[in-house]
Amino acid sequence: MCQSKFAPYYQKLGLDFSVEKKTSYGKQNSLPHIHDQYELLFCLSDNMCFDVDSGSGTEHHFIQKNTLLLINNMDRHYFYPAEESGENIRYVVYFDPAYIDSLSTDEISLLDCFLFRPFPSAQILSVSAEQSQFLQQLLDKILDIDQRPAETFYGKTLYLRLLLAELLLNVNSFYRAEHHIASPSASNKYRSVYAIINYIHTNYNEELTLDALSSQFFMNKFYLCEVFKKVTGMSPNQYIINCRLMRAKELLLDGYSVEDACARSGFNNMSHFSRTFKNKVGVNPKQYQKQKQTS
């Protein structure tokens, strides 16, 4: 694989989840990146910037303290101080979505706040000072317990699992209140859509059609389109294209040729890839690669 300063950042974690509290200054060496795990970033500093691209273009956001960033594995993102020497204090939680889904129930999915996105800026959630204090105490408790030896802490793994579930349950509760989402049962019918989204995230480079998804998940294709759009704000086909474009961008920035990026991201021919890329991004794949290499 080709390497460049724009190589994507794939966070490879050996655990089902991890929690850190970090402090840094300035932009350091961070770059826009994407990773297989989902991420919950809890910002504790003012005057921060958050850039995110889910396939259809980069959105730029100005972030203040007491803000949660809800990042799934198709969000290419970059979080940094607005000022060159600015302080950046945050908690960062990485987790395997399959692990979190196993903590969910038939009534409540803990992945709601990472996948239910029918409205703009859905990755960003501001919380009150009281909510912030509660979340910080809970995260500090997780960090404290994580440092204790398992040999002297009976049930450590289970306790951490319960605390993580409590954390995400509260984040989802804040998210639902902020966006005026109805009772938990309203999202129950979306569980199958979350499964489809994760399937697309995993198989974007395969042949994916509405008929194939309908057959795979035993859903009427017209109903599938209806509920999928309620969750994501777009059709399944639009979502698949955005996922493929996101991966194509990563491959181009990592130094792959346009032909390789086309094949590896799931586009079936070069002309379709180039046309779709230019329509969505504004330049063709080669121009995009050159622009980023010289910027």
Image: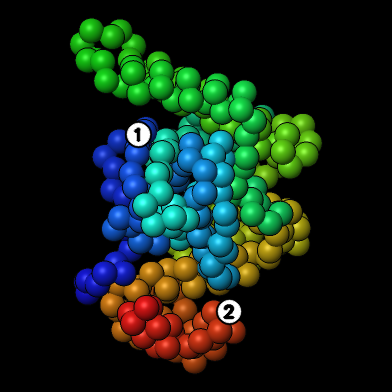
Q: Say left or right for 282 vs 190.
A: left
Q: Kindly identify the residue that appears in the image at 33 percent across and 80 percent down.
A: 293
Q: Say left or right for 194 vs 74.
A: right
Q: Label 2 crowding class (10 Å Cα cut-off): few <14, some 14-19, many 20+? A: some
- If you read the primary sequence from the N terminus, does the residue marked by circle 2 or circle 1 appear first? 1
Residue 182 can be seen, yes or no: yes
Q: Kindly identify the residue that appears in the image at 34 percent across and 39 percent down.
A: 23
- In the figure, 66 relative to 1: above or below? above
Q: Secondary structure at mark 1?
A: strand
Q: Kindly identify the residue that appears in the image at 36 percent across and 85 percent down.
A: 290
- Whole-percent x, y for residue 86 in the image: 41, 49
Q: Secondary structure at mark 2?
A: helix
Could you give the CA–CA distance between mark 2 and mark 1, rounded to whole angstroms? 36 Å
Is residue 105 or residue 78 the one in the foreground?
78
Q: Amino acid at mark 1?
A: Glu
- Whole-percent x, y for residue 69 in the image: 53, 45
In the rendered image, which residue does mark 2 sit on? Answer: 280
- Whole-percent x, y for residue 292 in the image: 38, 78
Q: Kindly identify the residue that appears in the image at 56 percent across and 70 percent down.
A: 57
Is residue 225 or residue 93 the one in the foreground?
93
The quarter of the image holding the C terminus is: bottom left
- In the figure, 146 relative to 81: above or below? above
Marking on residue 122: none
Q: Say left or right for 189 vs 94.
A: right
- Whole-percent x, y for residue 171 in the image: 59, 32
Q: Amino acid at mark 2?
A: Lys
- In the figure, 55 relative to 177: above or below? below
Marking on residue 20: 1
The quarter of the image holding the N terminus is: bottom left
Q: Label 1 crowding class (10 Å Cα cut-off): few <14, some 14-19, many 20+? A: some
Residue 224 can be seen, yes or no: no
- In the figure, 56 relative to 15: above or below? below
